[in-house]
Amino acid sequence: MKARSALVYTVLRLLAFLVPFGLLMLLPIMREYYWLAAIFAALIGLSLSMLFLRRPLDDMTAGLAARRARARRPVSDEDVEDAASDAAEPRPGD
């Protein structure tokens, strides 16, 4: 996974919440009910991220999938045999 794709997605998700929250806090009624502003901002941020952040999410999940696939790479018989023969051979100077 590229750290850049995760960072971009995280920053954009935070902005999708913080910008609507800041705009809602400008309204006088929302200053009194800040928890309601937070709920509305969360819903707006979720909607915005579903609509506009599909590509950064795909980049991040593709990186995670590639990383997981590399970790689960099956070990071939040739690799095992090579490792066993290398361990069994006496090294020069031994």
Image (cartoon, rainbow, N blue to C red):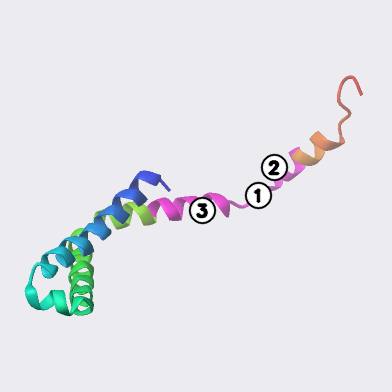
Q: Position of residue 3 (x, y in %)?
A: 40, 45
Is residue 3 found left or right of 70 in the rendered image?
left
Which region of the structure is painted magenta?
62-82
Is residue 3 part of the magenta span, yes or no?
no
Q: Quadrant of the C terminus?
A: top right
Q: Quadrant of residue 49?
A: bottom left
Q: Quadrant of residue 82?
A: top right
Q: Position of residue 17 (x, y in %)?
A: 22, 64
User: What residue is pinned by disc 1?
Assistant: 75
Please determine whether, in this image, residue 16 is positioned above or below residue 2: below
Please determine whether, in this image, residue 7 is positioned above or below residue 54: above
- Residue drawn at x 57%, y 52% is 71
Please determine whether, in this image, residue 1 is positioned above or below residue 54: above
Q: Position of residue 23 (x, y in %)?
A: 11, 65
User: What residue is pinned by disc 2?
Assistant: 79
Is residue 38 found left or right of 4 in the rendered image?
left
Query: What numbered label is drawn on residue 9?
Result: none
| Mark 2 and mark 1: Cα distance apart in space | 7 Å
Mark 3: which amino acid? Ala
Give SS at disc 1. Answer: loop
Circles 2 and 1 in contact, beta carbons < 8 Å: yes
**How many other residues sit within 10 Å of disc 1, few (<14), some (14-19) or many (≥20)?**
few
Mark 2: which amino acid? Asp
Is residue 80 part of the magenta span, yes or no?
yes
Circles 3 and 1 in contact, beta carbons < 8 Å: no
Which residue is the extreme one toward the right? Answer: 94
Q: Earlier in the sequence, mark 3 or mark 1?
A: 3
